[in-house]
Amino acid sequence: MQRFAPRMDSTRQIPAVQSVVNDLLAEFHARAGCDKIGLTRESWAAILCEVGAKNVSETSSETEVRTFFLSLRIDELALARACAAGHNSAWEIFLTRYREKLYQSALRIAREDSAARELADTLYADLYGTNTREGQRVSKLASYTGRGSLEGWLRTVLAQEYVNRYRRTKRLVSLDEESEEGIQFRAPDPEPVPPADPRLAQATDEALALLSPEDRMVLSAYYLDGRTLAEIARMLGVHESTISRKLDKLAKALRKQILAGLGRRGMSRRQAEEALEVDVRDLHLDIRRSLAQDSSSPAFPEKGVEARVREGSG
């Protein structure tokens, strides 16, 4: 059997990953129907190595790496990446499977037919890759890794696009409206608050970086945009109580992760807790940068940041 050790210019090369990919390549290539959607063994091997390099540790054993690969949605990963590569046969399958599901998800989010179709069409453009970078077509589907269902991933991306559109709309405030609200003539901003301990910002960024795309979207929608629990629940097609429980769980987990991160940076438990109590009000800049894809989005409203992090241990 021919074996591939593809060159990965922008990803880590992990021997265990390449070894397992070589062992599973023929099976995965057949199971995913790669021949039907235009993926050669070499291109499929490169995709698997890329996904593995981004999701397993360099110290992982071959058994652990094999377990990881066997947990992936291999057929959906192949379909998504074949679409990202522009193979028409893959797109025909994708549209047959997901066109109606995407529209229904968009309709649940936007609640109006024309707005839903516009939202779905925008996502189709991003998925197909109408934008280019350095002469290459860029498709959002190239970021799907097969770790969850493709349908769930698409639903999350759709909801994030809706949030981004909402932010852009909020910023389109006319000069007259600003004048009426007195924004033009407001008093100068007070002196800036001294920056928080940099270790606190680092630990917070580290904790937020571990979140899944859906958790980022939920936190971003609730804190950055002030969306209600009901609105977020409708966007994701779940019950409002599910979002409430998710936010509480995320707050507790984030607090625990931040405390652990501060401990790794030399703080005692007491110092770490005092840092959260005293400086959490200053974290909005780091949190905004870590959660918001659009850097010009407003900071967290005051209603939740401080209270949720402090109460997370309760």
Image (cartoon, rainbow, N blue to C red):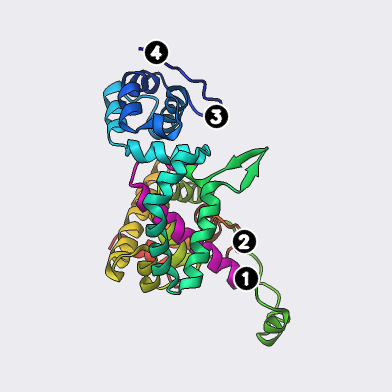
**Could you tell me if the residues under marks 1 and 2 are in contact, i.e. CB atoms within 8 Å?**
yes
The residue where tag 1 is placed is 171
Residue furthest to the top: 1
Single out the mark in the foreground, 1 or 2: 1
Three-letter amino acid code at disc 1?
A: Arg
Q: Is residue 267 visible?
A: no
Label 1 SS: helix
According to the picture, the residue beneath numbered tag 3 turns out to be 10
First along the sequence among labels 3 and 2: 3
Q: Secondary structure at mark 2?
A: loop
The percent coordinates of residue 159 (x first, y second) are 44, 61
Q: Earlier in the sequence, mark 4 or mark 2?
A: 4
Residue at figure coordinates x 32%, y 39% from the top left: 73
Q: Over which residues does the magenta segment extend? A: 142-169
Residue, disc 2: 296
Q: Amino acid at mark 3?
A: Ser
Where is residue 272? Give x, y as percent.
40, 51
Instruction: Give residue 250's quadrant in the image.
Output: bottom left
- In the image shown, does 102 or 188 lie closer to the viewer? 102
Neighbor class of circle 3 (other Cα within 10 Å; few <14, some 14-19, many 20+) is few
